[in-house]
Amino acid sequence: MKDNVTRKANINKEGIEITAKAINEGLINNKVYCKYCGKLIDSDSKYCTVCGREQ
């Protein structure tokens, strides 16, 4: 029984770590896709650095 509880706790811990990492990367990387060419650009860019079109 104790092993089962430990296993469930480890699964929850892993899920929380994955979620926290995804949130952190989203806040740090702050990227969006260009509306026209689909490349990743900074979310505060007025123009795409790849195709040059205004966002």
Image: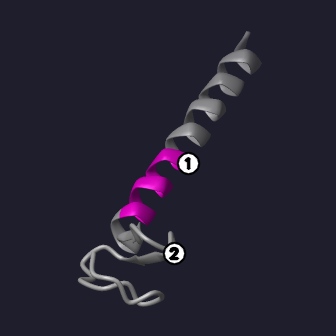
Looking at marks 2 and 1 on the same chain, the residue that comes earlier in the sequence is marked by 1
The magenta-colored residue range is 17-26
Q: Residues within 10 Å of mark 2 (few under 14, many from 20)?
A: some
Residue 32 numbered mark, or none: none
- Tell me the quarter of the image containing the N terminus: top right
Q: Secondary structure at mark 1?
A: helix
Indicate whether 25 appears above or below 43.
Answer: above
Q: Residues within 10 Å of mark 1 (few under 14, many from 20)?
A: few
- The spot of residue 23 in percent (x, y) is 40, 54
Residue 18 numbered mark, or none: 1
**Residue depicted at 37% across the width and 84% down the height:** 48
Is residue 20 on the magenta stretch?
yes
Task: Indicate the colouring scheme.
Answer: one colour
The amino acid marked with disc number 1 is Ile
Pointer 2 residue: 39
Is residue 4 on the magenta stretch?
no
| Prevalent SS, magenta region | helix
Q: Secondary structure at mark 2?
A: loop
Residue at the top extreme? 1
Indicate whether 25 appears above or below 47.
Answer: above
